[in-house]
Image: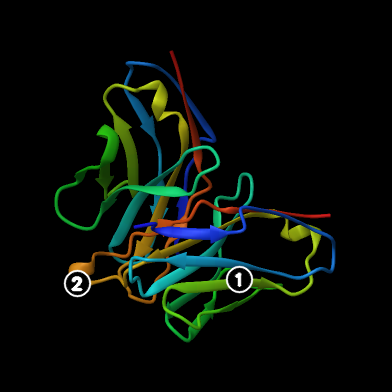
Amino acid sequence: AQSVAQPEDQVNVAEGNPLTVKCTYSVSGNPYLFWYVQYPNRGLQFLLKYITGDNLVKGSYGFEAEFNKSQTSFHLKKPSALVSDSALYFCAVKGYSSASKIIFGSGTRLSIRP
Amino acid sequence: NAGVTQTPKFRVLKTGQSMTLLCAQDMNHEYMYWYRQDPGMGLRLIHYSVGEGTTAKGEVPDGYNVSRLKKQNFLLGLESAAPSQTSVYFCASSYPPGGLAGVGEQYFGPGTRLTVT
């Protein structure tokens, strides 16, 4: 069975500092991995995805994520945080099978202090 | 393009009442989904559809029904609302995974906040 874990409910970072939001997954075979962001009172927005190839994936708003197969992780990163990055972030995983559904993590609230 | 729209945005129901949530997308996506979002639980899939006229159960389908009579619309019905159905409901759509259409990243509507008293 597929699963995805976001071990931190909340991450607090000072503006200008690097940030990391953690995600680990479990899936049979190779995974498709996603990050979504949710701003208050809004739906989720797609940030980036890993399909295959380069382990470092770049996405919207300066975010990137690193796929680590041996650690089954897909951590979201940004070199310099902005206050406007404060939001709820969701990691998601999908198996290669066309019948496989996307499974979302429970979310991590990112708070950037000025 | 409006993307994915949901109506209504807010609704308060009494236990036992019924209602229908409407989702519409203008991206010609084959797949559509209904999720509920509860604090600390992420998104849970209620029902989904892989094409017009087809629907399937997700992770938490009990107490809900759906219909996909037109490709662009996906309706979620609550026949007899219960307080446990108090939640924020999100609709999403995507291309099918595979090929040039990508791996099925989803596009979400703004949500419907439902309270059942």
Alpha-carbon span between mark 1 and mark 2: 29 Å
Q: Secondary structure at mark 1?
A: strand
| x and y, in percent, of residue B21 in the image | 62, 66
Quadrant assignment for the C terminus of chain B: bottom right
Furthest residue in direction top, as rendered: A114
Which residue is pictured at 66% across the width and 72% down the height? B77
The residue positioned farthest toward the left in the image shown: A53
Q: Residue A10, relative to residue A91: is it above or below?
A: above
Residue B76's x, y, as percent? 61, 71
The relative height of residue A81 versus residue B117 in the rendered view (above or below) is above
Which mark is first along the chain, 2 or 1? 1
In the image, which disc is placed on residue A61?
none
**Which of the pair B108/A49 is nearer the observer?**
B108
Q: What is the number of the mark on residue B99?
A: 2
> Is residue B8 depicted above or below A63 in this figure?
below
In the picture of the structure, the residue carrying the numbered disc 1 is B76
The quadrant in which the N terminus of chain B is found is: bottom left
Q: Is residue A29 visible?
A: yes
Choose top left, top right, bottom left or bottom right for residue A53.
Answer: bottom left
Residue at 33% across, 17% down: A17
Packing grade of label 2 (10 A; few <14, some 14-19, many >=20) is few
Residue type at numbered disc 2: Gly
Q: Tell me residue B19's x, y (percent).
A: 71, 69
Q: Residue A1, can we see it?
A: no
**Number of residue marks:** 2
